[in-house]
Amino acid sequence: MALSTRSPRRTASRQPALPSTSVRALLLKIVLLAIIDAISIFAAFMLVLQDNWVVAIVVLVVTALVNWVYFSRRLLPAKYLTPGLIFLAVFQVFVLLYTCYVGFTNYGTGHNGTKEQAVSSLLASSLQRVEDSPTYPVTVVDRLGELGLLVTDPETGDAFVGTNDEPLSRVSGATLEGGKAVAAPGWTSLTFQDVIARTDEITSLAVPYSSDPNDGALRTPDGSNAYRYLSTLEFDAQAGTMTNTQTGVVYTDRGTGAFVADDGAELRPGWQITVGFDNFVRAFTEQSIRGPLIYVTIWTFVFAIGSVALCFGLGLLLAITFQNARMRGVKYYRLLLILPYAFPAFLSILVWKGMMNESFGFLNQVIFGGAAIPWLTDPTLAKASALLVNVWLGFPYMFLICTGALQAIPDELTEAATMDGAKGWQVFRQIKLPLLLSTTAPVLIASFAFNFNNFNLVYLLNNGGPRDTTTSLPVGHTDLLISMVYKVAFTGQNRDYGLASAFSIIIFLIVAIIAVVSFSRTKALEEIQR
Amino acid sequence: MKVTKKGALSLGAIAVASAFVLSGCQASSDDGGDKQASGSLTVWVDAERVDALQGAADAYTEKTGVEVDLVAKDNATIKDDFIQQVPTGEGPDIVMGAHDWLGELTTNGVVAPLELGDSAGDYLDVAIQAATYDGTVYMLPYAVENIAVLRNADLVPEAATSFDDMIAKGTAAGLAQPFVVEQGAEGNPYHLYPFQTAFGAPVFGTDDSGSYDAGDLQLGSEGGYEFAAWLASQGKTGTGVFNTDIDGAIAKQAFLDGTAAFWLTGPWNVGAAVDAGINVAIDPIPSPTAEAAQPFAGVKGFFLSAESKNKVAATDFLVNYLGSEDVQLELFQAGNILPALSAAADTAASDPIIAGFQAVGGDAVPMPAIPAMGSVWQYWGVSEAAIINGEDPKATWDKLVADVSAAIG
């Protein structure tokens, strides 16, 4: 656009400076877009190689869209918004949708992959080496594309050969090298490179030891030695069942994401399936989960509301105090009060954690003269401690906000109110506070949402402790919903990503509802003031 | 004029872009071709041990032509990343880890059995025992780690013969808290386990093959209650030897400052003590009973991915290269933990500190890797912490046994 409006003047005055800048800008734009296009076409190409068609098409469509937006002469707002929207889609919308998807699956320990993977893993680990069987030196051999094992009996030194379908049979005329048969007539021996190139065939190669299946089969894990294995599990692909060949127990797929026997015994690993609303139902009905979920939710609200109220109250009090003209050395006090805010929060929390140690902490040892106050180990006191530390971290910010907001309230209003006969408290309560609240409300809502998910504080201060020993979830008395989700998903040996995702969706809904309701109420507040 | 210029520019841009794309394709197809011809292995390695493995990786590439790509990973996330990425096909062929991951790895079906063949006899017994899960070997062990008592030989010149002797010797040296061990608000059963075994109460019994049996919970045996009573007598309301306020950092500081002469900890803390100029001796763990105090052994090793496309080369690399004495010694030098290969362990034991840990390790039992252990960890430490802090030992231990039994189901 700039180009077209300026072009007539350019030709008239024949000044080279202007056109060269626009050409340079255009050149830059084309180069940047070319780089982006090159990267995305490369990415799409790699994705297609991996048979990932959906993502490849998405990448190409987005790239085409970007090109269209930037080469178009209109669409000015889109030019500014596109990069942000793409990042929003990748880092927020996609994550949100994926979490929702996981919330409806049984993804977690024991349900980690696909059914095919579970089957192959079960079969692989069901191989038991035949007791006291020796190591057989082998050479992998090929006959018209069919692989076989050329086996040397370690005791007699005789050579045998067999394939997947043919049990071992003696071969005559095998070439021996250091007591190991390395070649046999009619078979081509594979070099190590060939072996590696045909890894898939070799890992599925099982040569029956004899015609009796109970003698097991020879398999070679490394291409040069074979061992005799018996399989204890058999997979019937038609019926979709696993049978234990030793006990005869049949494990069936009953749609629970695992092979289950009649007596309820499950084979692990299972696989991932979608389970509908099961995770949500469990969160609200299973006693050992519902109990913690309820009291953690209550504490999360108490913590978030308490933090905001106390931080704001203290910040406001200090801001009002410092507004008083009679106060001296305000500059230095202000500097001191900003310190907790300027200090890295992680460090402050860890220092507080050390200071609150019952036997060795600074608080008990120095301030309380050796008292044994269980700051972080008593359920109730630990909650108070968490609030205390959070107020320490949060009040300077509120103090700054309130100072600014108070200064923005014109003095005339106070004067007018005083003229009308209002006392100090009335002036504050009825004039200043409403004005203050209307400007700080968005900050308070944001602060509430932040503290609702204040993972850092809880995790670093006490890791949610003291632990609640009455439930099966590893939650503690100061855990917030978000740290509970973290513990369910990422700690211990029994992860449950599905349940954790369901919890996160619940948290998202709570925070979203509160934010929407509060913002609409703030709007109402603003309208009153107009 | 203007239009042609622009047109030329766009043409140029398209040319440049296509050049980018074409060169990209070219390079990638070359790479793919090479890889298919000779194969390549991706190995996820603890960041501190990449250099120790580089030699073995290069030697393997030289001999077989198989590229070995060592990827340094953060130790804290390596297990989760492995479990999550193997099913997607993006995981490595080999991963470095610890034997107590086995329960989780097999439950998730992400590891493949590993046949050590005849070389299994070349490793320390405890290492093979730990690498075996449900009768099948899944791990190539490279190091065995256990705790022992670090003694400040300048303060207490002689090793203690029993737990009480240790406290007496330390008190005689004028120390108020002669013995420290890492605990914390949620306890630390790993560090208390030697004392528990001294009372004859392992967590699980073992079956015929020596594997832990989840159905045989031994926590609730008579020895367990004796241990609980003893723990209470050494806790807050008793002698105060154990204190849940002593965490790792406080215990370390006490030993480094010389206010404690005995420190029950692992090889990972020896460096700090030696650097602080303390004359460190490694002692067996003094037992509170006549029985030996057996610590847990943690065995480190390498796992083979269930979805590896190169199982043959990976097995060959693991068993025949990483299982060699040279590589095991290289790894020992990088981490200063006792090698799992017997021959390498004997060489490493020329260092008195390592020899000290090796002697204690003779009594060590592998930490159970069965999934039921997860339920034990969940309640165990908290209960021990409660007993140390003065709760009734019998009632608390009862609850522990009941909770664990219920959780195992």
Image: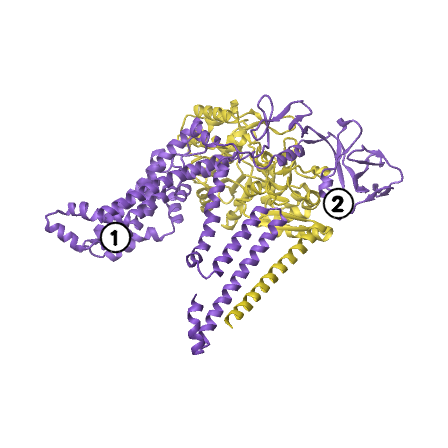
Residue B104 is left or right of residue B247, and the answer is: right
Decide: few, some or many residues near mark 1? Use Cα within 10 Å; few <14, some 14-19, many ≥20: some
The vertical placement of A304 against A72, above or below, is: above
**Which residue is denoted by mark 1 in the rendering?**
A405
Instruction: Find numbered disc 1 in the image and state the secondary structure of the residue it sits on.
Output: helix
Chain A palette colour:
purple
Chain holding disc 1: A
Residue at (33, 36) in percent of width and height:
A381
- Observer-side mark, 1 or 2, equals 1
The vertical placement of B172 against A3, above or below, is: above
The one nearer the camera, B129 or B45, is: B45
Chain holding disc 2: A
| Amino acid type, mark 1 | Ala
Q: Position of residue B189 (x, y in %)?
A: 49, 34
**Which residue is denoted by mark 2 in the rendering?**
A195
The vertical placement of A9 against A316, above or below, is: below
Chain B palette colour:
yellow
The one nearer the camera, B138 or A58, is: A58
Q: Position of residue B260 (x, y in %)?
A: 46, 41
Between discs 1 and 2, the one toward the N terminus: 2
The vertical placement of A7 against A332, above or below, is: below
Residue at (31, 46) in percent of width and height:
A444
Asked if the residue at tag 2 contacts the one at tag 1, i.e. Cβ–Cβ closer than 8 Å, the answer is no
Q: CA distance from mark 1 to mark 2?
A: 76 Å
Report the disc number at residue B369.
Answer: none
